[in-house]
Amino acid sequence: MQVVSQAADLAKGTPVTRGLEGCAIVIFGATGDLTRRMIVPALFNLRQRGLLPDDFAIVGFSRSKWNTAVFRDEMGTAVREFAGGVDRDSWEDFAQRLHYISGNYGNRDDFQQLAALLSRVSEEHNCGGRYVFYLSTPPSVYSDVIQQLGAVGLHQAEESDSWRRVVIEKPFGRDLATAQTLNAQIANVFAEPQTYRIDHYLGKETVQNILVFRLANHIFEPLWNRRYVDHVQITASESIGIEHRAGYYEESGAMRDMFQNHLLQLYSLVAMDPPVVFDAEAVAAEKIKALRATRPIPLTQIDQWAVRGQYGPGWVRGEYAKGYREEENTDPQSNRETFAALKLYIDNWRWEGVPFYLRSGKSMTKKVTEIAIQFKRVPHLLFGLTPADTLNPNAIVIRVQPNEGFSLQFRVKSPGQTIRVHQVSMNFDYESLFNGEAPPAYETLLLDIMRGDRTLFAHSEWIEYAWGLITPIIEAWESSPASNFPNYEAGSWGPPEADALIAMDGRSWRRP
Ligand code: BG6
C-alpha cells in the first residue's frame, strides 16, 4: 500500500518500485473492455514513467482468434485512447513485450499451450517464472480458468525465487453461496496469500488515506467512537445512468454493484480498530472484525433498515435523462434497484448505538463519493441558534471524489457586535497541495500485485461477511417486487423513502 503518493515518494528518492519484481502478466479476457480501457493503459503508463522493470511481459489469452500482431495493434489503439500522452519509443518498447494466444477457458490443451508460451516469454524477457494470472473475463468462466491453471500446474512456481499470483475482478459472486463456492474453487488451487481480489475503490488515493488520517494523527482517533460520533454517512452517488450495461445491471442492481464491495469497504475502513501492524493480514483482520460485529438487518422490518429506488425520467445537469425502464435493453417492467440506502449498527465497544447510513445510486444529482463523520452536538449550547443552525454540528468529511480531500467543519463567531454563530470548514485539498498527482487506482493496484502487497485487496473472509450482510436484503427485494418503481427522478437525490429512513431517527442526508 502506498501511504504517500507515488510522485511524492519519488521526490523523496524512495523508489515506488521497491519490492517490485519482473514478471509476466497473463490477462484472461484480453480482448475485453477492461483490458483495453484499464489494465493495458495502466501498465503502459507505469512502464512509460519508468516504474516497471525491464524483465516484464504481458500475455493476452482470449477466445478470439487474434494473434500477437493483432493484439499489439489493438492495444496500440487502446493506449492512444486511454493512456494519455504516448511517446513512440515507449510504445515500441512496450509493444515488443505483448504476446497473445487464443484458447478456450475450459480446455486443458489450450492451457498447456499457454504454459509453453509462458516459458518462452519468461525466458525472452527474463521474467524468472514469476506469473500474474489476471482474470478479466466474465465471472461465468472464473472457475474454468482457475481449474485449468491448477490442472497444468501453472499455479505453482518451480523455483524458490519465483511465484504465481491470481487476480480476480469483480463481481466476486452474486450472493453468499456463489461467493463461498468461488472462494472454495480458488482455495483448491491457490493459497490465500497468492489471491488478489480487486476492488478499485481501495486503490483510490483518498481511500488509502483514511487509515493514515485516522492513525497517523493523535487528534482524531480519540474522537472516533460512540462517545463523540453521532452518526456516519457514506454516500456514493453517480450522475450517469447505467449507460450501455443493461445486461449486467439487470442481473446486478445497486446492492451487488456498489454496496457489497465499494461501500462496505469504505465502511470497514472507517469502522475498524487500529491494526497491530500495518500489513495485509493485520488490516484484513480488523476489517473482518468490523463486519462480523455488524448487526444483521432485521428482515421482518426491512423497510426501516434498507430502502430501494429506481430512477424514472428526469433532468441531469440540464440534460434530459431517460428512466431506467426506458434504457436500451432493460425490461420495461424491471424491478431492479438503481438506488439503495441502508442503516447499519456495529455491536462493539467503539460503535454501540452509532448508526452508519450508506446510500448509492445511479442518475442522481451529481457524482460524489464522501464519508461524513457527524459529531454529537455540544452538551449545553450557550448561544441562541436558529433551528437550522442547530442541525449541523462538527463533522469530518472525507471527500473520496471529486475534489479529493478532507474537511473539518466547525462553528465560529461571525464578525460583529452581537454573537452570531457561523459554520465554517477547514479544508485539505489534494489537487492544490499535490498538483493533482494522485495516481489512478488501477496503477496503484497493479504495482501492489507485482510487489506482493495485498493490503488493498479483499480477503476471502471479508467477502463472505459482506455477502452475508447483503444477500438477505437482495433476496427479500427480489422476492417482493417494488410496487412504486420508478420512485425517484433522474437528477434528484434519490427516493423519498431514503429521506424517511434517516428522518425516522431525527437526522437528514447531507447534500454534498
Ligand atoms: C463499478 C460499478 O464497480 O464502479 C459501476 O460497476 C460504477 O456501476 C463504478 O459506476 C463507480 O466507480 P467510480 O470509480 O467511477 O466511482
Image (cartoon, grey):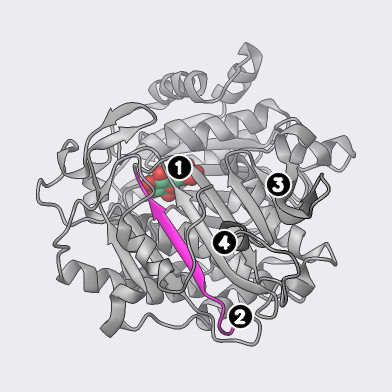
Q: Provide residue 308's location: percent of width, then percent of height.
A: 29, 61
Q: Which residues are magenta?
A: 351-362
Residue position marked by numbered label 1 in the rendering: 27
State whether residue 143 appears in this view.
Answer: no
The one of 53 and 330 positioned closer to us in this rendering: 330
Tell which tag, 4 or 2, sits nearer the viewer. Answer: 4
Query: Which mark is drawn over residue 351?
Result: 2
Q: Residue at the location (69% across, 80% down)? A: 227
Image quadrant holding the N terminus, namely bottom right
Tell which tag, 1 or 4, sits nearer the viewer. Answer: 4
Indicate left or right for 371 with 244 as reference: right
Per the image, is 117 magenta?
A: no
Tell which tag, 3 or 4, sits nearer the viewer. Answer: 4
Q: Provide residue 211's location: percent of width, then percent of height.
A: 71, 62
Crowding around mark 4 (Cα neighbors within 10 Å: few <14, some 14 to 19, many 20+) is few
Q: Name, please, the residue furthest toward the top.
A: 88
Type of amino acid under label 1: Ile
Type of amino acid under label 3: Glu
The one of 478 and 413 positioned closer to us in this rendering: 413
Crowding around mark 2 (Cα neighbors within 10 Å: few <14, some 14 to 19, many 20+) is many
The secondary element bearing badge 3 is classed as: loop
